[in-house]
Image (cartoon, helix red, strand yellow):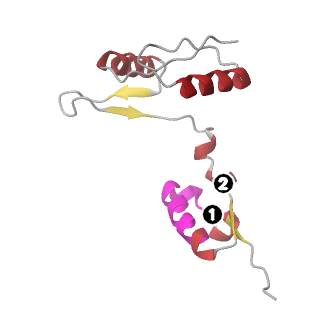
Amino acid sequence: MTQVNAPEFVRHPKLVAWVEEIAKLTKPAKIEWCDGSEEEYQRLIDLMIANGTMQKLNQEKHPGSYLANSDPSDVARVEDRTFICTENEEDANNFKEVLLRWQTKSQQQKPSDLIRINKTKET
């Protein structure tokens, strides 16, 4: 099992126990505890630049700004496979508006392809 090795700033025993439980289930290669420091921030930025996830923008025009890209196969970006099922048409319509804003014009489908509303007869 991956060692949890909680740092001293993590003082909540239930949190440590939860991380241990999840580590047993997921078997991660490594567990990192975030401290929110400037050093940690810079290390993560440098890592994302090195692996191509982020690009540093013109620092003279936009200091501290980066362009972050996700993988096109990321499930959160696969709108054509996104479905919402609800019994409430208003919920579906609200979600449809958000979903269509995420898509480019070429990705948009008919809302009926994306939204399924379960209308049942009331007796």
Residue occupying the far bottom of the picture: 123
Task: From the top left corner, tell me how far across and down residue 95 is, in percent.
Answer: 56, 64
Do the residues under discs 1 and 2 have CB atoms within 8 angstroms? yes
Question: Residue 77 vs residue 54: left or right?
Answer: right
- At label 1, the amino acid type is Gln
Residue 80, numbered label:
2
- Give the residue furthest to the left: 60
Q: Is residue 95 magenta?
A: yes
N-terminal of the two: label 1 or label 2? 2
- Mark 1–mark 2 distance (CA, rounded to whole Å): 8 Å
**What is the x, y in percent for residue 102?**
50, 54
Q: Is residue 8 positioned above or below 96 on the image?
A: above
Residue with the mark numbered 1: 109
Secondary structure at badge 2 equals: helix
Kind of residue indicated by mark 2 = Asp
The chief SS type of the magenta part is: helix
Residue segment shown in magenta: 92-109
Image location of residue 62, percent across then percent down: 22, 34
The answer to whether 25 is drawn above or below residue 1 in the figure is: below
Q: In the image, is residue 81 above or below residue 15?
A: below
Name the residue rendered at 37%, 34% in the picture: 67
- Residue 32 among magenta residues: no
